Amino acid sequence: MQTVKMVITGPFSSGKTEFIRTVSEIDVVATERKISSEVEKIKESTTVAMDFGRITVDDDLVLFLFGTPGQKRFDFMWEILSEGMLGFIVMVDSTRPETFREARTILETFKAYAPTPYIVAANKQDSPDAWEVEDVKHALRLDPEVKIMPCVARNKESVKTVLLELLYGILAEMEKN
Amino acid sequence: MALKGNLRDFTITQLLNLVNLARKTGSLIIEGPTDVAQVTFRDGKLAFARLGQTDSSLATILHLNQKITAGQYRVIKERAGKMTDKELGLLLINAGYLSQEDILGSVQQYFIAIIRQLYTWVDGFFRFQPDLMPPEDKITVRLDLENLIIEGSRQMKEQEQLQEEIPSLDMALKFSERPGTNLRNVSLSVEEWRVVSYINPKNTIRQIAKANKMNDLAIRRVVFSLLQAGLVQLARPEGMPVAPVTSSSSSRPGAAPLPVTNKEEQKSLVNRLISRIRSL
Ligand SMILES: Nc1nc2c(ncn2[C@@H]2O[C@H](COP(=O)(O)OP(=O)(O)OP(=O)(O)O)[C@@H](O)[C@H]2O)c(=O)[nH]1
Ligand SMILES: [Mg+2]
């Protein structure tokens, strides 16, 4: 059995668990915890170690999707999770610009772990408060060649599109070398 | 209670805050990366500060503060070399050259400058010695710590932000490929130019800092302003080991990016992933 892995990262509450849950064939093995601290109480639970989703490709190939914990105090997990990833996706909550700075930090950190392809997903595009993808791109100060995609993590087609875009990027990278 | 530790865990600002609140008397000895500093307090107020072996004689301090000219400085050093600071101070006041405020103000500025320098130390052992006071002949001040503490916390905030923006100094810098940025059209400070001149995928930010004798905070400030201006990008340094591709024997699922090493097999594998996801 062969396995490959992709990492879904991003700030607290950006929609990583939702993203994995939408496409994973098994119930996501999420290590969620009820949130106690007042500051972070914008939702009920948060991922504390990692999310873990799975897509069986065929008889001898499985794709694992790993979601990182969003809260800063768990960032010691990041490096471990990033080991051997095929690529990564940085989820950004397009409705909360106050998290953009952190998204950038996370992106830079993961980039430093491994030079694998990655894309940015501007999530929650279904919300009326969502920033335009182009605006998110500028706010994150992404380089022009960095791919950023609109995303609605609750929507399967949208999640598929993001995953495919990353895979095309990986393929293109292989053609180059 | 032994008041000692490392600046990594307890910052200078936090120490000043503690001294202020507890109205402490005694000296903080801080062993920084390159120097040892002594900062002395009396009843929770700053009394004295000294950094390493730097010449902290009154004549030098007054010269630094431009209270005396280079000529006067030389004369004092020649003729009054044996005088203590207190004696020299009295002499200058009595001779009508300077006022007491001039002298105390200069000394105070000098101490404050040392504390400001200490703010940039992020690593170093400190200990508090209640019994250690400055030498008898040194001029001391009585300065409230509040303003210094406020200034320190502002700096700390800046430092934290910079830390977030530039998480690692082991990254290299490269010129931005963004169209329309032309180095010739921007005005850079001398410090920025110095950094720019070392930009090369082979040099990490840390190496650039070392070559320019800049501390962490200073190099982060410069790199941040260059990033903000869109002139440079962070890059993986050349020669840095790439992805930790562990052997397939690793127990973690998918520890190596791809279980196959042959290029064509890799592509076919990614293509299999693509068709599977399309079919979801
Ligand atoms: N409107 C909208 N809400 C979303 C979307 N994706 C996620 N959410 C909501 O955003 C909140 C956070 O989603 P999670 O999936 O828990 O986010 P996370 O990134 O896993 O969060 P942590 O694990 O705590 O870092 C939840 O209330 C989701 O229902 C989306 O595409 N649109
Ligand atoms: Mg989660």
Image (cartoon, rainbow, N blue to C red):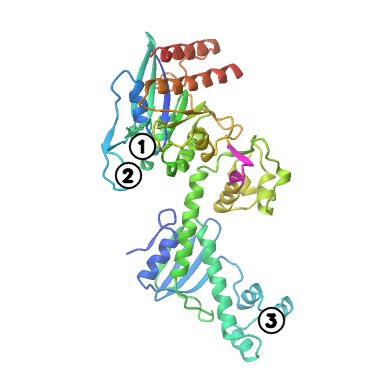
Please tell me the numbered disc located at residue A13: 1
Please tell me the numbered disc located at residue A40: 2
User: Mark 3 and 2 residues: CB-CB less than 8 Å, in contact?
Assistant: no
Assess mark 2: CB under 8 A from ligand 1? yes
Whether residue B226 appears in this view of the structure is yes
Pinpoint the chain carrying mark 2. A
Magenta span: B226-234
Q: Quadrant of the C terminus of chain A?
A: top right
* Residue positioned 42% across, 15% down in the render: B277
Give SS at disc 1. Answer: loop
Do pointers 2 and 1 mark residues of a single chain?
yes
Give SS at disc 2. Answer: loop
Foreground tag (3 vs 2): 2
Task: Assess disc 3: are there few (<14), some (14-19) or many (≥20) residues with their C-alpha within 10 Å of its C-alpha.
Answer: some
Of A144 and B176, the residue lying toward us: A144
Task: Please tell me in which quadrant of the rendered image residue A92 appears.
Answer: top left
Q: Is residue A155 left or right of residue B151?
A: left
**A164 versus A118 height, above or below:** above
Whether residue B256 appears in this view of the structure is no
Q: Which residue is mark 3?
A: B76
Of A24 and A22, the residue lying toward us: A22
**B59 versus B150 height, above or below:** below
Please tell me the numbered disc located at residue B111: none
Kind of residue sitting beneath label 2: Glu
